[in-house]
C-alpha cells in the first residue's frame, strides 16, 4: 500500500525524469506525448520576495503607523488576501481537503478579529469592512 508521501515521491521522480528526458539530445516532444507522460506546468505564485513585498504594501495600507504589522486591521487584510488565493485554488482543485480545512481556519480567525474590532473600535471596523469589500 502506498500512502500520500509515496505518491508524492513518485510524482517527483516522474517530473525529474521528464525534465531529464525533455532536455536530452535526440528526444522529441512527440516521443514524450506517445509515452503518455504528462506535461508539467511551470510553478506559479511561488516567489517569496513578491509575497513579502505584498505583505509590506498591505501593512502600509492598513497599518495604524509605519511599522505596524500586527494590528487587527493588518491581520484581517492579510487573511483576506490569503483567503482569496485559497478560494481560487480550491475552485481548481475540488478534492484538496487539507487546504479546505486551512481555509476554514483562516475564515474563522478573520471572523474573530473582525468581531474584536467591532467590539473595541467600531469606526476602524467600518473602515476596514469598506476597504476590503466584505459583506458585513
Image (tube, rainbow, N blue to C red):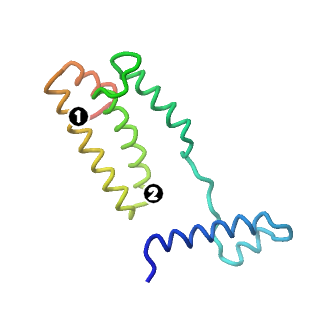
Residue at image point 33% right, 50% down = 103
Residue at image point 44% right, 71% down = 4
Q: Quadrant of residue 118?
A: top left
Q: Quadrant of the C terminus?
A: top left
Rendered location of residue 69, percent (x, y): 37, 26
Rendered location of residue 37, percent (x, y): 65, 73
Which residue in the protein does label 1 denote? 113
Rendered location of residue 20, percent (x, y): 74, 66
Q: Which mark is residue 92?
A: 2
Residue at image point 25% right, 35% down = 135
Vertical arrangement, residue 27 with respect to residue 84, above or below:
below
Residue at image point 56% right, 73% down = 10
Q: CA distance from mark 1 to mark 2?
A: 28 Å
User: 97 or 53: which is nearer to us?
Assistant: 53
Vertical arrangement, residue 58 with respect to residue 32, above or below:
above
Mark 1 neighbour density, 10 Å: few (under 14) some (14–19) many (20 or more): some
Mark 2 neighbour density, 10 Å: few (under 14) some (14–19) many (20 or more): few
Q: SS class of the residue under badge 2?
A: helix
Q: Residue furthest right?
A: 26
Rendered location of residue 49, percent (x, y): 56, 36
Vertical arrangement, residue 61 with respect to residue 108, above or below:
above
Amino acid at each position: 500500500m502506498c500512502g500520500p508521501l509515496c505518491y508524492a515521491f513518485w510524482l517527483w521522480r516522474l517530473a525529474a525524469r521528464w525534465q531529464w528526458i525533455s532536455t536530452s539530445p535526440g528526444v522529441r516532444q512527440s516521443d514524450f506525448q506517445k509515452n503518455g507522460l504528462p506535461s508539467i506546468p511551470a510553478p506559479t505564485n511561488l516567489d517569496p520576495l513578491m509575497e513579502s513585498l505584498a505583505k509590506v504594501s498591505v501593512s502600509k495600507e492598513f497599518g495604524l503607523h509605519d511599522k505596524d504589522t500586527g494590528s487587527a486591521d493588518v491581520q484581517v487584510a492579510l487573511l483576506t488576501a490569503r483567503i482569496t488565493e485559497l478560494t481560487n485554488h480550491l475552485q481548481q482543485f475540488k478534492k484538496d481537503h487539507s487546504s479546505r480545512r486551512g481555509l476554514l481556519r483562516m475564515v474563522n480567525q478573520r471572523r474573530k478579529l473582525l468581531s474584536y474590532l467591532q467590539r473595541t473600535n467600531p469606526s476602524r471596523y467600518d473602515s476596514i469592512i469598506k476597504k476590503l469589500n466584505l459583506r458585513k
